[in-house]
Image (cartoon, coloured by chain):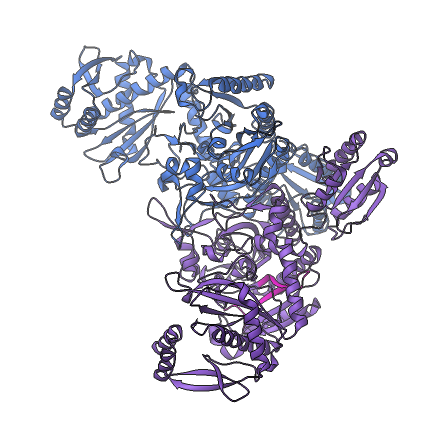
Chain colours: A purple, B blue
Amino acid sequence: MCSLEHCDPPRPLPNGGGVAEGRGEGSEVINCHGEHVEPCYPLAMPSQNSPEVDDLYKLRHSLAHVLAQAVMKLWPETQIAIGPPIDYGCYYDFQFANPISDEDFGAIEKEMRKIINQGQTFDVDVLTIEEAIAFWKERSQKFKVELIEDLAREGATEVTHYRNIDAKGDTAFTDLCRGGHVDNLKHIAADGFKLMTLAGAYWRGDEKRDQLTRIYVAAFPSKEELKDYLFMLEEAKRRDHRKLGKELDLFTFSELVGPGLPLWTPRGTLLRNQLDGYVWELRSAKGYQRVTIPHITKKDLYETSGHWQKFSEELFRINTREGHEFCMKPMNCPHHTQIYACQQRSYRDLPQRYAETTTCYRDEQTGELHGLSRVRAFTQDDAHVFCRQIQVKEEILKIWEIVDTFYATVGFGTLKVRLSLHDPNDFGKYLGTQDMWKKAEAALRQIAAERNADFFEASGEAAFYGPKVDFIAKDSIGREWQVATIQLDINMPERFNLFCMNEEGKEERIVMIHAAIMGSLERFLSIFIEHHAGLFPLWAAPSQVALVPVAAPHEMYAQEVEALLKAIGIRTEYMDPSESLGKRIREGEKQKINYLLVIGDKEVADRAVSARNVRTKNQVTVSLDEFVSAVRDDVANRRLQETIA
Amino acid sequence: MCSLEHCDPPRPLPNGGGVAEGRGEGSEVINCHGEHVEPCYPLAMPSQNSPEVDDLYKLRHSLAHVLAQAVMKLWPETQIAIGPPIDYGCYYDFQFANPISDEDFGAIEKEMRKIINQGQTFDVDVLTIEEAIAFWKERSQKFKVELIEDLAREGATEVTHYRNIDAKGDTAFTDLCRGGHVDNLKHIAADGFKLMTLAGAYWRGDEKRDQLTRIYVAAFPSKEELKDYLFMLEEAKRRDHRKLGKELDLFTFSELVGPGLPLWTPRGTLLRNQLDGYVWELRSAKGYQRVTIPHITKKDLYETSGHWQKFSEELFRINTREGHEFCMKPMNCPHHTQIYACQQRSYRDLPQRYAETTTCYRDEQTGELHGLSRVRAFTQDDAHVFCRQIQVKEEILKIWEIVDTFYATVGFGTLKVRLSLHDPNDFGKYLGTQDMWKKAEAALRQIAAERNADFFEASGEAAFYGPKVDFIAKDSIGREWQVATIQLDINMPERFNLFCMNEEGKEERIVMIHAAIMGSLERFLSIFIEHHAGLFPLWAAPSQVALVPVAAPHEMYAQEVEALLKAIGIRTEYMDPSESLGKRIREGEKQKINYLLVIGDKEVADRAVSARNVRTKNQVTVSLDEFVSAVRDDVANRRLQETIA
């Protein structure tokens, strides 16, 4: 899989790891084909394709005006910069004469409610550049002046100002704005918003320029929706994979190694390998074969593929001692083509299905890094199928089955599916013929229907080289994540001249299918850890069972039980017997070990165990045989929940 | 494992991939601690520690004088440069007035034999620098003049010349030389040497200077030994892993990806993974746990470890877009320390045993690359044990058992062992106390004795941070390879301040043990492929069984057999039935598939198979049940040879 979508971060939550300076909230992300793709946010609000988006956009955009108006009312000397809507509300950047703090939030919110309750409306003025500059110069608003000067430089001759009109018909506030507001501020629920955080932000993201104060606002159509969002935030905080990663000893970052470069401990590696091993098991059954490529390449490979220019900034570049230009791979597809191309392939050898779990590298900026969600080193469970056009449907079906099986097993139930199709009104930007596209898209639609998928179509969302299937998972606190995609590619085979010899002994151009199941393991694990709040399905858990003998006389039997479990591959912990029973149980719960086996007189006498299920908090006494057989069965069947207790 | 020994190449054989220019034959290799280590040559001759070395050295060194003398006799206008002994003979670099070719070898050999049979002796003259320069200027030998001028610059006031004295007492040839010759050339077997190849070589390895012609000579004490060596060379050529790698579709190199960066095909990856999986199985049983690290790091990690300066040239350096200095890891130990150090460890948590199969990168020069033997990307099956001093013996014993088991299973029988100890006369260069060293070395010696190892001790061969155990394997054509080492390290824990809390609640400095079993998988595979000449033990073979139905009526049963074998995990090939029986059998043999199952009327009728064992070339008919059970058993027990036929 080569799309950057697989390593994109969830947007840092406002009370999360700070704001990425130098990267606007709406800034674009470019995938490996140089296309702009949407970053994958946890979607706490309806997707971009829903009709509700416009109303929410207007609400949040209007609220930014309200925020600025309130601030100007309270501190008239303030310089105002920009204030766009964001996915959970809006923000506005200010330069205050004197610093404010979140202790001022109450006053600002009060002022905002007052403005909303006034039922202000919006009026628009069209001004020439000169008029607009004069307007803002008069008010000493230097940032607005600069924005307008830039617009003029880009060729604009006019700009629009939006004025808030109060009940008396007076202008309460004016802003430079392209529009998109509610008709009346009364349509904003006065109890549907909340000021969240203050953050530093440089003017225009340039650290050499003025430092501004950004105020983030959460905003929803109703009090209930705001409450749900705030609850989700609290839950997200509790489940934060960075916190759990440390508590459960899954991964670490080292000052010496550097930011964005996670090091996986034994427990974290085990978790990764369980998940990756499962993906491989599913793939192996579908005829995939593993391949192995290096993490670097000569520039030449990406000049041929076209990535050298398109990825430019994100490539970690290496100049060798002999003066050659190398770089670290930010994706795997071009390397895999070279394995396909190392010998002539007959149509009988196709499909060739290459799978590889391998680490890619991108030169992300430090400020954009976030836990495992956005890293500089991300490991993909990548696969590329090299096949004939007529084999595409069957191959996609196979991948789709793997995706569905995997996500159901790891606890995400049924995924939503987006069929990303071409834009029929702008066909010029795509490779291939209309006929080819129609057939390919029809095949996707048919597969989606055959699989009874919960799918919607998104015209114009295809890659330029072919249509895509994007899978969206909803986590246990309602956030949506784009997790897997299947992409049809008729571009790369062209660039690398990939073909097979067909039945007539002629060269036939092949197609490539890119497919990743987890995508970036790091990003997937951030989602997986938070989804399960660190209490993993038994088969995947780094520690599955803890032995808790009540006292010294029970240790011999406890050790026997441990040996028996270890012999069948169960990962056990023997809790330090010098600690009290209560403390060991609390420690086992904190470590989120699935079962705590309490062993006392009765258990020893009956060859039984008292199994405490940490998920349900139930405890039952069962025979050792029964416990062993249940655990073995749960693991073998990769059950989501433990059978016992 | 961090030693460069694991990625060092076998010396390219003289008729192999050409000579590495710019790298003298005796040039040194530096390990990850900045120490000079011996490159691992296939040792066709006695080891450096054997008493025979001196005689062989004298023989080969003397023969270089004979070669130069013969050349000067035939082409008196020739400029002579240098002529050292090498591990299978000697070479001499010349600048000829007119190019020669290997067609001239006969004449040179004839002249050399004539000189040997004259029974010339050596005489030595001590000359002042001025006298020596005058001597060579008079003879217009510019290279000798330059060598002497350099010696003078380094502080020499005198040099020695060795003269060959013929039967009449006349000087037949004079060379600038430090000595070390046979008493009489008659001690050189006139039929024990052979001129092998011509190669280009730059004067002083500098491509901006004169290009010289290097003549390689194979030289042994007897005709028989020369014959054995030449046979070994022929065998080595037949087994060359670069040739077999292509024929058996194991790995490939891409012009676009670049030299020294192998790409592993499905078959090659399977072979790698079989071997690596076996190492992991052995390690897992000894309590090792897998960890995962990125392939890059900030400079800071290597400044702390001390590698930044010592590795300097061999590091692939990366400058990030934010201007930070990163580099690709050339070894794993510093990264692994950061996992150990991510939390405070109690003595109860030790040993921590981290294992990881991960790729390292070194900026090797293009001319030094050789197949899989010397690459820019090499994958180590690396492990680091973090333990207390008192646990060292037990941990080394565990690794030693793994090494012995692994190498016996993969077909190298018993390994020779070198205990690399400190030099008691130069203790200043080592870290730690004499007592610590004595104990550590005594422990190694004791383990070696307990294991009945075929070991020898090499004083002064230790690393500066601790003693080592080096394992040497002999392949099926008699070449010796250093394959595994265990290294005790008291340096890295000091630099990274690694400790555990001991029983008294005090910080106790720990030690590290570095251990790799295969070392570099690439280098090991080059040895493994050549050792087995591509016909691997059944359990490791990418294709284990081929189905060869005699004619169409036998196909149904053949397919049933294939399905049965696949169901139990046997890797099968169904040979293209449109080809003739003979061609399919030849193809199966060429592909070195262990068993070819020929299926005709009788086999179908009896539910049997005619199993042709490609190794023994025997064919027997056995019941299908018997075949399945034998194959399953051979794989489960990782037998070296197949049971059937």
Q: Is residue B604 left or right of residue A213?
A: right
* B53 is higher (above) or lower (below) than A603: above
**From this viewpoint, is residue A87 visible?**
no
Q: Is residue A274 left or right of residue A331?
A: right
Q: Position of residue B383 (x, y in %)?
A: 55, 35
Looking at the picture, tell me which residue is in the foreground, B594 or B421.
B421
Q: Is residue A466 magenta?
A: yes
Q: Specify the quadrant of the image occupied by residue A146.
A: bottom left
Magenta segment boundaries in residue numbering: A460-486
Of all residues shown, which one is farthest toward the bottom?
Answer: A169
**From this viewpoint, is residue A151 visible?**
yes
The mark tally for this picture is 0
* A463 is higher (above) or lower (below) than A642: below
Q: Is residue B315 magenta?
A: no
Q: Residue at x 65, y 61 (%)?
A: A400
Q: Is residue B26 left or right of residue B612?
A: left
Position of the N terminus of chain A, as image quadrant, is: bottom right
* B138 is higher (above) or lower (below) than B570: above
Q: Specify the quadrant of the image occupied by residue A572.
A: top right
Looking at the picture, tell me which residue is in the foreground, B311 or A202.
A202
Q: Position of residue A170 (x, y in %)?
A: 49, 87
* A245 is higher (above) or lower (below) than B614: below
Q: Specify the quadrant of the image occupied by residue B117.
A: top left
Q: Position of residue B342 (x, y in %)?
A: 55, 41
Q: Position of residue A625 (x, y in %)?
A: 83, 39
